[in-house]
């Protein structure tokens, strides 16, 4: 763990240090890298803990680090309206089983963002209430934001949906 001056990271380290791989605060951006099995617990703490109160999940996305293991990285951006502070949380997932807990039970805004990451990267969100494609047709094969997805791939024609 980086020895950082961020009070947010210090508090997280003091309470959930064993759930973290690393922390850093570079250029004012506080970041914690969480072990995937502890993600839901850590995020619940960040939302509910007095003085932290991260009541907004601003964004979540994925990064494909093709050639590295773990290959995928989930990135979450949190914001506290009451405290006016931000925090970035990351979790690395293996290529063989890219699965992480859904945050829909903590923040409703996670719903469609998780579906988008599932659709475009193939990362599964355990406990998501309706995990299915959101941008691409169900017949689309593969996940187009993965770095190993063929650039020249063409999708088959989509049949109109029946009412």
Image (cartoon, grey):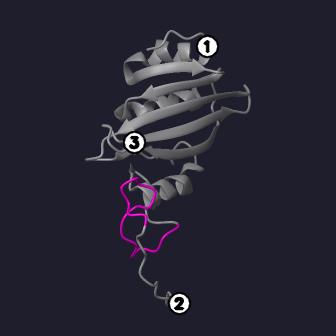
Q: In the rendered structure, which segment of residues is drawn in magenta?
A: 135-151
Q: Which residue is denoted by mark 3 in the rendering?
A: 65
Earlier along the polypeptide chain: callout 3 or callout 1? 1
Q: Nearer the viewer, mark 3 or mark 1?
A: 3
Mark number displayed over residue 145: none
Q: Residue at x 52, y 46 (%)?
A: 61
Image quadrant containing the N terminus = top left
Q: Is residue 136 magenta?
A: yes
Q: Nearer the viewer, mark 3 or mark 2?
A: 3
Classify 91 as above or below 112. above
Q: Which residue is denoted by mark 1 in the rendering?
A: 7
Image location (x, y in percent) of residue 48: 58, 29
In the rendered structure, the answer to whether residue 25 lies left or right of residue 150 reads right
Q: Nearer the viewer, mark 1 or mark 2?
A: 1
**Can residue 156 be seen by looking at this rendering?**
yes
Image location (x, y in percent) of residue 68: 33, 38
Earlier along the polypeptide chain: callout 3 or callout 2? 3
- Most common secondary structure along the magenta stretch: loop
In the rendered structure, the answer to whether residue 42 lies left or right of residue 83 reads left
Q: Are marks 1 and 2 in contact (CB under 8 Å)?
A: no
Q: Is residue 93 magenta?
A: no
In the rendered structure, the answer to whether residue 16 lies left or right of residue 135 reads left
> Residue 86 sits in which quadrant?
top right
Classify 121 as above or below 158. above
Q: Residues within 10 Å of mark 1 (few under 14, many from 20)?
A: few
Q: Which residue is denoted by mark 2 in the rendering?
A: 163
From the viewer's side, name the closer residue of 159 and 15. Answer: 159
């Amino acid at each position: 763990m980086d020895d950082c001056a961020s009070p947010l990271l210090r508090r997280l380290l003091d309470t959930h240090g064993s759930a973290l791989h690393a922390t850093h605060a570079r250029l004012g951006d506080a970041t914690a890298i969480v072990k995937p099995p502890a993600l839901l617990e850590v995020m619940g703490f960040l939302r509910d803990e007095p003085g932290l109160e991260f009541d907004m999940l601003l964004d979540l996305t994925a990064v494909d680090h093709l050639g590295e293991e773990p290959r995928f990285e989930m990135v979450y951006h949190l914001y506290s309206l009451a405290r006016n502070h931000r925090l970035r949380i990351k979790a690395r997932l293996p290529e063989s089983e890219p699965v992480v807990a859904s945050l829909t039970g903590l923040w409703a805004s996670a719903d469609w963002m998780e579906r988008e990451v599932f659709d475009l990267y193939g990362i599964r969100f355990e406990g998501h209430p309706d995990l299915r494609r959101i941008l691409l047709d169900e017949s689309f094969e593969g996940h187009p934001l993965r770095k190993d997805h063929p650039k020249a791939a063409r999708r088959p024609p989509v049949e109109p949906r029946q009412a």
